[in-house]
Image (cartoon, helix red, strand yellow):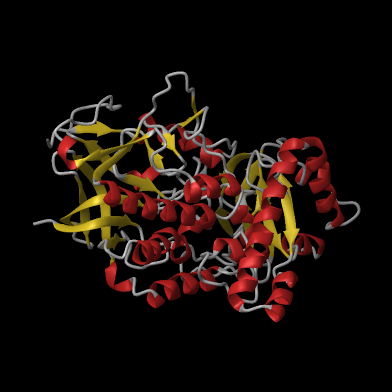
């Protein structure tokens, strides 16, 4: 027997709990449930436990728009963010609607019944359970929680020490006084390296190629000043908009002036390092600013650790692991007692759910994005996917707000099904993300496409999305709304790969 509600939210992390708060406030007549595959809420901020875990976005924009961030640090540690997310759920009575240990694996849509049937596995026994709903809101994040990405390293089994991926940090890992090599140059490595350097005998950050690294104050002095002048709510809103505007400038100006931006960021890194440091080799990327995400280091902690001699950056390629460490292509040997593979995530669109619509299997890669949150051919479904150039929550909040507006509009006009169409065949397909990062490129083919024109473009622009999602029309000529009387007609022109054998 399936349990029924108006909305099923997949995931009880930052995005899922935020969406639940939106539904509760703006769609009070809608019932909903959150299905969380893990045995704890918080998503990323509960999963990751490695030393120094923190945000790489400021909390005035990573936080929810309606709940002021009151912590001292703008660049907050993971435990504080987790506490903030769980506090939000508790304050809004969301906890009672969360089902832990419910891993959603599939969803099938029936136009005849105008509803999704959601298949999940409950608990360690993986007991099959079923839910039905009118609308499916996917907020499972963008990567696989089960395991991170680790390349195949020759000689891995020869290494006498321990090899750890940061996504599943062992509680018993003792690195005090040890020689540590951290492989990677992304946000995780930039966080781990200075944190581990406080206890380890030595830490080497081994990278194939450099990333852009920018130092930012861990505390926001303007936010503190505004809190003295205004109420917490007003000060938070002003700080949030200040950081939104600065963030947009920091993204778009480098796109307009790539050469100048590259020189400026490298000059900042040179300023924070010793005069004779080889910035050209270790902190000068081969790509333009924002072709990959810029790494943020609070109060320049990475640069400080390098200056203090606690951290060494090595730019080279791995030839193989050895018994005592890593041999590089240059012939150099890196001695190690412990190797950390900060080599990235396994991206996973829509939580890896298997979708069928009216008996036909739909692959997300065969669909096209609509307004950054819905997809052609997938009815009554939205996906919370945040920004790659700004705080995740800015876009997740707008998505939830838009879905509330959509559901209320459907009630007002008597519609029971909504599905985006791609009426203009001249619209060209483009990749979902315009990012050259390895973790993105490895899995990009699995994600929905975006189009060359709006509303099928993914703009990565908060101001544009604010106008489109908050103030734009629901009946825009692209989103097809169907009343119950017309549901005998199945969804036409669906992309499909195979018949669902279960139908």
The percent position of residue 473, horizontal first and vertical second, equals 44, 43
Marks counted in the figure total: 0
* Outermost left residue: 1
Q: Nearer the viewer, residue 30 or 414?
A: 414
The reply to whether residue 75 is in sight is no
Q: Quadrant of residue 364?
A: top left
* Outermost front residue: 413
Picture layout, residue 486 above or below residue 77: above
- Could you tell me which residue is drawn at 36 percent across and 33 percent down? 376
Picture layout, residue 266 above or below residue 58: above
The percent position of residue 204, horizontal first and vertical second, equals 68, 55
* Quarter of the rendering occupied by the C terminus: top left
Left or right of residue 220, residue 232 in this image = left
Q: Quadrant of residue 349?
A: top left
Picture layout, residue 253 above or below residue 229: above
* Outermost right residue: 275
The percent position of residue 191, horizontal first and vertical second, equals 63, 60
- Could you tell me which residue is drawn at 83 percent across and 58 percent down? 272
Q: Nearer the viewer, residue 282 or 448?
A: 448
The reply to whether residue 16 is in sight is yes
- Could you tell me which residue is drawn at 14 percent across and 33 percent down? 488
Q: Nearer the viewer, residue 282 or 75?
A: 75
- Could you tell me which residue is drawn at 38 percent across and 76 percent down? 90
* Quarter of the rendering occupied by the N terminus: bottom left
Left or right of residue 503, residue 344 in this image = right
């Amino acid at each position: 027997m399936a349990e029924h509600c108006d909305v099923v939210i997949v995931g009880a992390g930052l995005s899922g709990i935020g969406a639940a708060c939106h539904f509760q406030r703006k769609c009070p007549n809608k019932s909903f449930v959150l299905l969380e595959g893990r045995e704890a809420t918080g998503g990323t901020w509960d999963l990751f436990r490695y030393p120094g875990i923190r945000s790489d976005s400021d909390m005035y924009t990573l936080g929810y728009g309606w709940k002021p961030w009151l912590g001292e640090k703008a660049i907050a540690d993971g435990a504080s963010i987790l506490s903030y997310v769980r506090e939000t759920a508790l304050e809004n009575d969301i906890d009672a609607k969360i089902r832990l240990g419910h891993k959603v694996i599939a969803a099938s849509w029936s136009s005849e019944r105008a509803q999704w049937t959601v298949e999940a596995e409950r608990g360690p026994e993986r007991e099959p359970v079923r839910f039905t709903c009118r609308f499916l809101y996917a907020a499972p994040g963008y990567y696989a929680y089960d395991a991170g990405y680790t390349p195949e390293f020759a000689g891995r089994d020869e290494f006498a020490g321990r090899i750890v991926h940061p996504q599943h940090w062992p509680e018993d890992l003792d690195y005090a006084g040890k020689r540590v090599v951290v492989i990677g140059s992304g946000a995780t490595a930039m966080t781990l390296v200075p944190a581990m350097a406080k206890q380890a005998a030595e830490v080497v950050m081994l990278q194939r190629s450099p990333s852009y690294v920018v130092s930012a104050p861990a505390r926001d002095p303007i936010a503190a000043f505004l809190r003295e002048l205004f109420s917490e709510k007003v000060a938070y809103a002003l700080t949030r908009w200040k950081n939104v505007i600065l963030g947009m400038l920091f993204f778009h100006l480098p796109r307009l002036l790539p050469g100048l931006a590259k020189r400026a960021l490298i000059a900042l890194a040179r300023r924070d390092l010793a005069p004779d440091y080889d910035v050209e080799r270790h902190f000068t990327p081969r790509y333009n600013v924002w072709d990959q995400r810029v790494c943020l280091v609070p109060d320049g902690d990475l640069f400080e650790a390098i200056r203090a001699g606690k951290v060494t950056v090595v730019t080279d390629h791995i030839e193989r692991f050895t018994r005592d460490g890593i041999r590089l292509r240059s012939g150099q040997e890196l001695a190690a007692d412990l190797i950390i593979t900060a080599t990235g995530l396994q991206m996973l669109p829509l939580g890896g759910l298997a979708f069928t619509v009216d008996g036909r299997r739909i692959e997300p890669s065969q669909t096209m994005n609509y307004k950054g949150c819905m997809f052609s051919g997938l009815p009554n479904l939205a996906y919370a996917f945040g920004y790659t150039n700004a705080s995740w929550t800015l876009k997740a909040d707008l998505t939830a707000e838009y879905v509330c507006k959509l559901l209320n509009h459907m009630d007002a006009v008597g519609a029971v099904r909504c599905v985006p169409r791609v009426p203009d065949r001249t619209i060209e397909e483009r990749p979902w993300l315009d990012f050259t990062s390895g973790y993105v490129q490895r899995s990009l083919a699995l994600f929905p496409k975006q189009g060359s024109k709006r509303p099928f473009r993914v703009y990565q622009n908060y101001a544009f999305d604010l106008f489109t999602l908050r103030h734009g029309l629901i009946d825009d000529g692209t989103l097809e709304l169907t009343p119950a009387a017309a549901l005998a007609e199945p969804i036409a022109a669906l992309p499909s790969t195979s018949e669902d054998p279960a139908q």
